[in-house]
Image: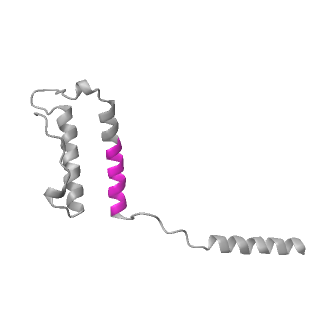
Amino acid sequence: MQSMSVLLAMVITTGVMMGQTPAAPTGPTGPAAEVQRGYAAQKGNILKSADKMPESDYQFKPTQDVRTYARVVNHVTEAQLRTCGAVNHLAASEIANVTKRSPQ
């Protein structure tokens, strides 16, 4: 009989524990979360790429009609600043200036 009481207590305890609502997610959910995950992935890729490129190769151009590697990285930075500025309702004058552009 005692083992039956212990078993019943375990079943009730387990049922109560499993019936609790999970903790609320931290941070954004839905489309905002998707955008943030995408941004984090792209940011990591771009930073790793920039770190691996030797400084002497930042002026590399595969052909005359293509931008230098430095200009591509600069372009991505400018686009990111404009996008973040727009999302945060900043005027163009409030957005940080990117280092002066190198010749394409």
Write the residue at 33% across / 63% down.
Answer: 31
Q: Nearer the viewer, residue 59 or 13?
A: 59
**Looking at the magenta stretch, what is its main secondary structure?**
helix
User: Which quadrant of the figure contains the N terminus?
Assistant: bottom right
Point out residue 33 in the picture as x, y percentages from the top left corner.
37, 60
For the magenta stretch, what is the residue range?
32-44
Quadrant of the rendered image containing residue 82: bottom left
Quarter holding the C terminus is top left
- Number of callouts in the render? 0
Q: Is residue 43 above or below residue 91?
A: above
Residue 46 point in image, percent of width and height: 30, 40
Residue 43, by quadrant, is: top left
In depth, the one of 40 and 81 nearer the eye is 81
Q: Residue at x 20, y 64 (%)?
A: 89
Give yes or no for residue 85 being in the magenta stretch. Answer: no
87 displayed left or right of 1: left
With 61 as the anchor, is 27 left or right in this view?
right
Residue at (16, 31) in percent of width and height: 68
**Corner quadrant of residue 30:** bottom left
Task: Identify whether 12 is placed above or below 81.
Answer: below
Residue 79 appears at what percent x and percent y?
19, 49
Image position, residue 15 (x, y; %)? 68, 73
